Amino acid sequence: MKKLLTESEANQRDLIHILHKVQAEMGYISPEAIAAISKHLKISENEIYGVLTFYKAFSLKPRGEHLVTICMGTACHVRGAPRILDEFKRGLCIEPGETSEDNLFTLETVNCVGASWTVEDQRCGQADRRNKEKFKGIKREGNSIKKMEKINATRLEELKAEILDSRKDQKTCITVCGGTGCHASDVFRLQMLSGMRLRGRS
Amino acid sequence: MRTTGCHGFCERGPITVIQPDGIFYQRVKLEDVAEVVTETIRNKKIIDRLLYIDPRTGKKIIKEKEVPFYKKQKRIIFGNNGFIDPTDIEDYIALDGYKALAKVLFDMTADEVIAEVKDSGLRGRGGAGFLAGLKWEICRNVSSDVKYIICNADEGDPGAYMDRSLLEGNPHSVIEGMIIGAYAIGASEGYIYVRMEYPLAVKNITLALEQAREMGFLGDSILGSEFSFDIHVFKGAGAFVSGEETSMMASIEGRRAFPRQRPPFPAQEGLWGKPTNINNVETWANIPLILNKGADWYSHIGTRKSKGTKIFSLVGKINNTGLVEVPMGISLREIIYEIGGGIKDGKKFKAVQTGGPSGGCIPADMLDLTIDFDTLTKAGSMMGSGGMIVMDEDTCMVDVARYFLEFTQEESCGKCVPCRVGTRQLVEILTRITKGRGEERDIQKLQDLAKTIKAGSLCGLGQTAPNPVLTTLRYFENEYEAHINQKSCPALVCKDLIIYHIDPKKCVGCLLCLKNCPVDAISGERKQVHVIDQDLCIKCGACLDVCPPKVSAVVRYTGKKKERVLKNVQSKRAKK
């Protein structure tokens, strides 16, 4: 917590940013955390409490090990999301926003994750976590570590020509849609298998 | 090999396109990859089974641009998504990226830029449709040492995701638009407010900003000019109201996202009291294009008062779900039947909902309506951010209205009374109607209340919240009446008004529904007629889903028919 606070500036504008970090780190915002933030930003605990209860991203209670988020967006609604929610409510014996007694599941709803083609989109924390495990060792190379030069306007034209020139020999290019829609329907595994991108460009 | 942004045709994903021929493969599976490489790329052979089949003609289509979904579109903003790897700035530069910026910085004055944007007729894509150039000019004319610009990427309308696709797929086009805007307005700092539900968008835009900064498109003396400007990403925290401009500014300042009275408008007193210009993601993405191709070219697309194209997210009960970019002035029918491929499972089209919770439902007899800002408003709906949710005969319009009001009620920030209390009352009346406890006066009550909320609310959320009720009342009053007077739900959706029943003449006793019933409400033996115990049934619909289409013994009844069946069951039980 201390480390987290020393990393951020002491401005009201950083409050939401800090709350995001605490939530990600600890899974909820504890009274101790509120006190520490209040001291650091020199704003009252009251105000912090007001802000954090206003936004859905923050929770005052610890969440269960698995977070089940059900999309209740319009598209999901007309394609039957309420039925799915009812089934989860019945199965887990909890209402949205609650955590099961054994602390295993928290049930939440979200208004739209913007994945309206794969309705009903049920994001289950468990599956997420498993996937993360599976893909842990793989890192993308390429652009993020490529050295980039500072350019000016005349260089921009040259650079464009250079890029086009360097790609001249590239006869075929397979473009794989990486939008969230296709992503949800397995494109990630597609890229991994072909593996070309992961090893740099071909 | 390139991982690009979204191609838009989400329904058929994962999508792979082989350039330069534009061979379009859909629903590609892991097992297909090796074959694509050996057959298509090495041996130049097309793999038949991965091609898209036009459902109308039954013909297979090879090229991407010939797929009907793409054919009718005009993808000037969204089209590059399919060619660009969003994590690589070079891909953007190769497609004339940042060319407009260089032109603006060295060959144009700020006034000339504003004049160009004004002449183009570009209207804000966030919903209200205010002229972008005029908005810029107002902000430019306010004198202040510091000015801000904001990119509104808090795409809260359920079912709309075009802004996310742009941020994820072509982030530099938004960044370039913002830098040009900042130059024209004289802003030194910018914010992109992204909603937290979009992790990939946050990631891609952050990476894009880093790359742009490294190459000198952002920061001090951009591209060697005298202009300096930088952009920060602000991750939202889950509040629909923060898409409203004054609440968004409050949120960036680290406070609760409460809207405030206007005037003063953000252009006069915005972020930290300084002049601020807010535009939506799609608006910003239009800017580089306008400056590259000229206002004249741009203003030739679209209708007299709505220029350019608009990206819609076509979702709901439609065959081709996805993102479509069409010129303003296209008809609803063209979007739904020619691009969208018609209604799922051959059902009948009932309505299309545009504009999210602030918009309204447009009925079937208005399918030939041409779409632009003004026609939609006239129909009682609005453009909104561009969600287009298609509903078929199985959608209950009262339930839809209730759904939207529940949403706005939940998201109402609680600052002003008409919105906070009024929406709650609307939800309660609507819920009562869907539960079969509606009263005759309810329709009048809904109308009066809706008008009061519209007139008395502080911000856009409250002012538009009753639209779903008002439009469904206007076009589907008969459904309200059926719920209230006959206690029946014509679309067979409202749980309290329907029953599930197994037709004894049709049931073959296959045990499928019995096994799938989560509450063991179905009794019966193999090859014997199954019976649903109405006292135990929770109306989840599992039996209806699993009953084989050939048999289709599970039926839903509402209204008088429901009463008759119930009475029948009771009398049978009494006999036993």
Image (tube, grey):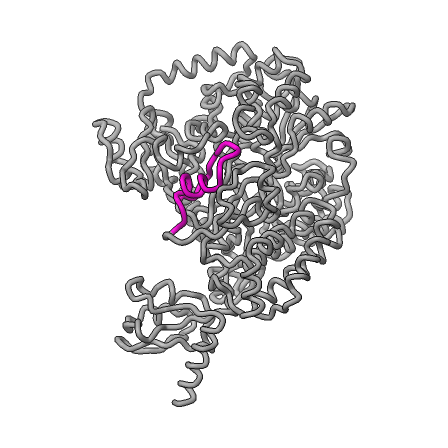
Residue B206 lies left or right of residue B14; in this view the side is right
Residues B393 and B130: in front is: B393
Rendered image quadrant of residue B561 = bottom left
Residue B219 lies left or right of residue B324; in this view the side is right
Q: Where is residue B496 in the image (x, y as percent from the top left)?
A: 52, 69
Asked if the stretch drawn in magenta spans residue B327, the answer is: yes
Query: Compared to B111, does B17 lie above or below?
Result: below
Q: Is residue A108 visible?
A: no
Q: Position of residue B101 (x, y in %)?
A: 58, 18
Asked if the stretch drawn in magenta spans residue B559, the answer is: no
Q: Where is residue B43 in the image (x, y as percent from the top left)?
A: 21, 27
Disc tally is 0
Residues B33 and B337: in front is: B337
Q: Quadrant of the N terminus of chain B?
A: top left
Q: Tell me where the magenta segment starts and ends, as one range.
A: B320-344
Residue B534 lies left or right of residue A42; in this view the side is left
Residue drawn at (49%, 71%), measured in percent from left and top? B559
Q: Position of residue A63 (x, y in %)?
A: 57, 56
Q: Is residue B508 visible?
A: yes
Residues A66 and B181: in front is: B181
Residues B319 and B8: in front is: B319
Residue drawn at (50%, 31%), measured in percent from left and top? B327
Q: In which quarter of the image is the C terminus of chain B?
A: bottom left
Residue drawn at (63%, 32%), measured in percent from left and top? B279
Residue B409 lies left or right of residue B458; in this view the side is left
Query: Compared to B495, does A198 lie above or below?
Result: above
Rendered image quadrant of residue B444 = bottom right
